[in-house]
Amino acid sequence: MSSQPSHPSLLIPGPIEISDEVSQAMGHYAQSHVGQPFVNTFGETLTQLRQLFQTSNPKSQPFVLAGSGTLGWDLVAANLVEPGEDVLVLHTGYFADSFADCLSIYGAKPTQLKAPIGDRPQLPEIEAALKEKKYKALTVTHVDTSTGVLSQIQALSDLIRRVSPDTLLVVDGVCSVGGEEIHFDNMAIDVCLTASQKAIGCPPGLSITMVSEKAMDVFKSRKSPPGSYYASFKNWLPIMQNYEANKPSYFATPPTQLVQALNTSLKSILSNPISDRFAQHKKVSDYVKSKVKELGLKELASDPANAAHTMTAIYLPEGLTPPEILPKLMSRGVIFAGGLHKEIAAKYIRFGHMGVSITDESRGEVDKALNALKEGLAEVQQAKGQ
Ligand SMILES: *Cc1c(COP(=O)(O)O)cnc(C)c1O
């Protein structure tokens, strides 16, 4: 039995349900951010992140900062790109537009390569773009939370190494890290940015980023100073290095309870082989998608090969809108999200299936959600005489 008050199941693409252990860690008693007990916890957490991202290069650098996933974009834009430099932004939905906006604010020049809704840019067009201009970085949204489209990181990495090896590979993994397969070293990723509240299973409030040795070298050879104060690697690098060496140090106060929660969540995630966790997310995702199909509904992702395993974006039957169906789910104890992609937001809903709702099958939340969807749709259609 859960020790949390009874509540509807939060099955949106983040924030997600948290385990009782994580919830209890959020209630940790007050600790000094420079006292040895907390310093040790923070240090251990940074080391756990190396395992989560699957990097064994001691020069890969984890950063954990108070902030949401969005702060990861600022880190990239302020530290790794200099004003006037070009960045190729692969667009699979809402989040690429925002990342491009963020890059522009810092003076970078983003070029977006857009795919039709539900699809992703194709390798030949990406290759052509990379050959056209020198791009400082290429950004890709691993799981686009607005469309449920999954991008291929390994194939992109191989392409970059072949045609533009100096270009940094930047992965927005906010809706993927902890649920989709990521191997930071093997995939030669330069930056993978994420947040605490999606597949990692913590409350919102932490920006979590892994930066490669190559990207840290690019940072160190900048000609201009970092374009931000709070989001500066220069300010945070010594702090992260000190924490990981169990030495107290201060630039700005970390959210101590959230770090306890992250440490607790990562302990649980890493207590089993990480490949089992990815396989479990895939298994449940395949099941959800087969049930969605049985209901006669279509996914936004046009092809199973480009569909995420942490969420499903589902078109509603013609004429139905999210404000009609979402309350029917809520009355059955299930919270889904409405549409986010602005061109089609009124036509679809989003089901986030990641973290403890997936790994702990005894919670029964996936079937509860699928039943609520089936019954809720029937109720709305009957009321409308369809
Ligand atoms: C949620 C999300 C973000 C933004 O994260 P916040 O924590 O809301 O700032 C960025 N990118 C992707 C892919 C996301 O899913």
Image (cartoon, helix red, strand yellow):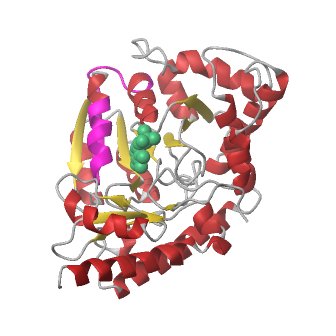
Q: Is residue 22 left or right of residue 131?
A: right
Query: Which residue occupies the foreground of this view, 224 or 143?
Result: 143
The residue furthest bottom is 294
Q: Is residue 346 left or right of residue 366?
A: left
The residue furthest right is 36
Q: Is residue 271 visible?
A: yes
Query: Which residue occupies the foreground of this view, 280 or 316?
Result: 316
Q: Is residue 301 visible?
A: no
Quadrant location of the C terminus in the rendered image? bottom left
Q: Position of residue 26 (x, y in %)?
A: 68, 40
**Which span of residues is magenta-colored?**
79-102
- From what the image shows, is residue 321 above or below residue 266? below
Q: Position of residue 17 (x, y in %)?
A: 57, 56
What is the count of numbered marks? 0
Residue 271 falls in image quadrant: bottom right
Magenta residue check for 210 = no
Q: Position of residue 170 (x, y in %)?
A: 43, 41
- From what the image shows, is residue 82 above or below residue 211? above
Query: Which residue occupies the foreground of this view, 382 or 83?
Result: 382
Split into quadrants, the picture shows ligand 1 in the one at: top left
Quadrant location of the N terminus in the rendered image? bottom right
- From what the image shows, is residue 324 above or below residue 98? below
Residue 179 falls in image quadrant: bottom right
Q: Is residue 141 left or right of residue 31?
A: left
Residue appearing at x 56%, y 59% in the figure: 7
Residue appearing at x 46%, y 39% in the figure: 69
Query: Which residue occupies the foreground of this view, 116 or 204?
Result: 204
